[in-house]
């Protein structure tokens, strides 16, 4: 029997690689006709990097991304609130990577095709629903020649935040939830800042900038590709061209709000002005749901637990989901029991992460400092003790499943390639 996967994003491709690793037949169905490198920068936490290394992708990751050295929070005036080492610099056995999402997706795609053959991915087929059938399941698809089906032992929904399979399970759920935050995302070729491989957040709840390099500096020019996100929050009641989400953006819509954000380590207006392309996105998530599994069908990745991009763990958790599903299939067979075991392990924790990312994620310290001093101080210790900042950071890592000691002590989820 074959595992049927809906979606060839990071989640679905990681699952395909993991199933191929353990010798389980699978087939992925993807809506787009041609898979290409879309998106902007993302971060992969050490728990996900461990899994990609175990898939034999260490050298490939180094060729497309940057090993992130630190993660820092700053006020709207650029003052440092808290900075901590990341990845191996923080004591993990594995690094954190900053990488272009599209380049990661194409790495997973090309590796999977080289290992499992081109026929393992069927493009131009959009998932529309499912039915359970005896001990298996059927994925319903809209193909180029009309409706069609794919029968398998189990069906895994890796079709993202707008998952058709989740909609069938929860027909009254409605669209993703928008709380008023708008993200403008772009990349700029410029000199790296701070130590050269650092992730930085500056601002507070209603206005902030996030930036980090996603390429090594060019040896001739010294310039790297810097990924950045400018965020503003508006009253959600006023709306925001919702019909135009994920569109090319106009700098005039947001750049004036950052016109005076010139720090001694980063010139934000210059970075925005020099961007090659800028795209506008809503910051959306969904409420936790009481179950992901319906018979021989389950949800994974953003189809299961879409969350605000606050803790840099969306893509990371999708990769971990893939490895855990494969491990449960290895242990329980291609059965609903494997899917239930996966959900029982991951869903309770991800419910907490979704809710934490709405206000008590790692970036909550930005608003704490803004409330206490308006973003200016001589010594941050006078505003918020560093011990409090460290404790807050450690609580989130533990919640999200990548505390240093916990992760380092875990046995591999699957055998190493």
Image: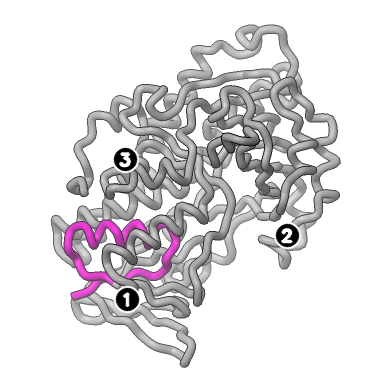
Q: Does the segment drawn in magenta span residue 5?
A: yes
Residue at 40% over, 35% down:
399
Which residue reaches farthest bottom?
145
Q: CA distance from mark 1 to mark 2?
A: 34 Å
Residue 398 in the image: above or below residue 324: above
Q: Earlier in the sequence, mark 1 or mark 3?
A: 3
Q: Earlier in the sequence, mark 1 or mark 2?
A: 1
The spot of residue 46 in percent (x, y) is: 37, 36
- Mark 1 against mark 3, which lies toward the viewer? 1
Q: Nearer the viewer, residue 379 or 69?
A: 69
Judging by the rendered image, the residue that carries numbered circle 1 is 119
Q: Which residue is mark 3?
A: 50
Q: Nearer the viewer, residue 176 or 246?
A: 246
Residues under labels 1 and 3: Cα distance? 28 Å
Q: Secondary structure at mark 2?
A: strand
Q: Whole-Å distance between the Cαs marked 2 and 3?
A: 35 Å
> Helix, strand or loop at disc 3?
helix
The image quarter containing residue 63 is top left
Q: Which residue is mark 2?
A: 248
> Magenta segment, which residues?
1-26
Number of other residues with Cα within 10 Å of mark 2, as a class: few under 14, some 14 to 19, many 20 or more: some
In the displayed structure, does residue 194 sit left or right of residue 295? right
**Which residue is nearer to you in this view: 109 or 380?**
109
Q: State yes or no: residue 96 in magenta.
A: no
User: Viewed as shown, does residue 97 lie left or right of 333?
Assistant: right
Tell me which corner region of the image, top left, top right, bottom left or bottom right, holds residue 121: bottom left
Residue for point 33% across, 66% down: 113
Quadrant where the N terminus is found in the figure = bottom left
């Amino acid at each position: 029997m074959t595992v049927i996967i809906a979606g060839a994003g990071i989640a679905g491709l990681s699952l395909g690689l993991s199933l191929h690793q353990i010798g389980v037949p699978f087939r992925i169905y993807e809506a787009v006709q041609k898979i290409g490198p879309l998106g902007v920068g993302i971060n992969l936490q050490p728990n996900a990097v461990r899994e990609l290394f175990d898939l034999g992708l260490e050298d490939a990751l180094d060729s497309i991304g940057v090993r992130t050295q630190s993660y820092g929070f700053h006020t709207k005036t650029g003052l440092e609130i808290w900075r901590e080492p990341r990845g191996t610099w923080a004591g993990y056995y594995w690094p954190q990577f900053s990488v272009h999402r599209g380049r990661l997706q194409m790495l997973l795609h090309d590796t999977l095709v080289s290992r499992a053959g081109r026929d393992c991915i069927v493009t131009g087929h959009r998932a529309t629903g499912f039915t359970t059938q005896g001990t298996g399941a059927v994925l319903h698809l809209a193909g180029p020649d009309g409706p069609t089906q794919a029968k398998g032992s189990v069906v895994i929904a890796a079709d993202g935040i707008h998952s058709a399979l989740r909609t069938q399970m929860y027909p009254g759920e409605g669209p993703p939830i928008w709380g008023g935050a708008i993200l403008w995302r772009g990349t700029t070729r410029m000199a790296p800042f701070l130590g050269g491989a650092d992730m930085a957040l500056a601002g507070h709840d209603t206005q902030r900038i996030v930036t980090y390099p996603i390429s090594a500096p060019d040896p001739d020019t010294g310039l790297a590709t810097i990924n950045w996100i400018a965020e503003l929050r508006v009253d959600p009641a006023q709306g925001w061209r919702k019909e135009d989400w994920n569109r090319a953006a106009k700098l005039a819509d947001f750049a004036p709000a950052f016109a005076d954000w010139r720090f001694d380590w980063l010139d934000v207006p210059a970075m925005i002005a020099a961007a090659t392309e800028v795209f506008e996105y809503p910051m959306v998530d969904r409420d936790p749901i009481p179950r992901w599994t319906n018979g021989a069908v389950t949800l994974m990745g953003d189809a299961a637990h879409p969350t605000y991009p606050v803790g840099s763990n969306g893509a990371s958790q999708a990769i971990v989901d893939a490895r855990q599903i494969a491990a449960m299939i290895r242990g329980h067979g291609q059965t609903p029991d494997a899917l239930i075991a996966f959900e029982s392990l991951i869903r309770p924790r991800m419910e907490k992460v979704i809710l934490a990312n709405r206000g008590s994620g790692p970036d909550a310290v930005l608003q704490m400092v803004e409330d206490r001093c308006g973003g200016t101080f001589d010594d941050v210790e006078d505003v918020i003790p560093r011990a409090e900042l460290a404790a807050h950071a450690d609580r989130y890592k533990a919640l999200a499943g990548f505390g240093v000691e916990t992760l380092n002590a875990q046995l591999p989820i699957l055998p190493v390639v």
